[in-house]
């Protein structure tokens, strides 16, 4: 499984973990042979999709600079829409 959740996060799995959230990184070290290449790093492991959804909301909220409740609500709604759109593309 390899499902893009947002621009910077994807959902994957392995033989021991049904749901793994990974974050996209681009190698910034100009000395590296991988400079400019996209890499993915696991950030959390989950047993069900409810946990995945909760973690994605937590990640986005903690990375934001939201200062108002209405803005927080909008951020969460936008995240839900983005994930739903990406899942629709996978299902097609």
Image (tube, grey):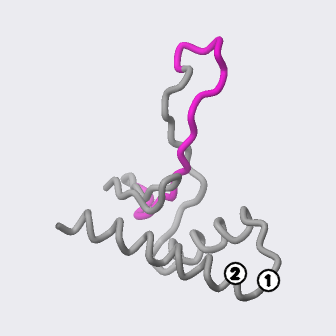
Residue at 54% over, 13% down: 33
Circle 2 residues within 10 Å: few <14, some 14–19, many ≥20: some
Residue 39 image offset from top left, x and y in percent: 51, 36
Name the mark on residue 21.
Answer: none
Residue at 56% over, 20% down: 35
Q: Which residues are magenta?
A: 16-34
Up-down relation of residue 2 to residue 32 (above or below): below
Q: Nearer the viewer, residue 73 or 2?
A: 73
Give the residue pinned by disc 1. Answer: 68
Residue 3 image offset from top left, x and y in percent: 35, 58
Residue furthest right in the image: 67
Quadrant location, the N terminus: bottom left
Give the residue pinned by disc 2. Answer: 72
User: Tag 2, which secondary structure?
Assistant: helix
Separation of marks 2 and 1 at Cα, in angstroms: 6 Å
Mark 2 touches mark 1? (CB < 8 Å):
yes
Q: Is residue 26 magenta?
A: yes
The count of marks equals: 2
Q: Is residue 30 magenta?
A: yes
């Amino acid at each position: 499984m390899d499902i893009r959740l947002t621009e910077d996060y994807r959902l994957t799995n392995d033989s021991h973990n049904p749901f793994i959230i990974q974050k996209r990184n681009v190698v910034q070290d100009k000395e590296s042979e991988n400079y400019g290449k996209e890499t993915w790093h696991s950030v959390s492991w989950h047993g069900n999709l409810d946990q995945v959804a909760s973690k994605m909301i937590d990640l986005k909220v903690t990375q934001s600079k939201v200062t108002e409740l209405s803005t927080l609500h909008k951020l969460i709604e936008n995240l839900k829409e983005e994930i739903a759109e990406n899942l629709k593309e996978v299902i097609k």
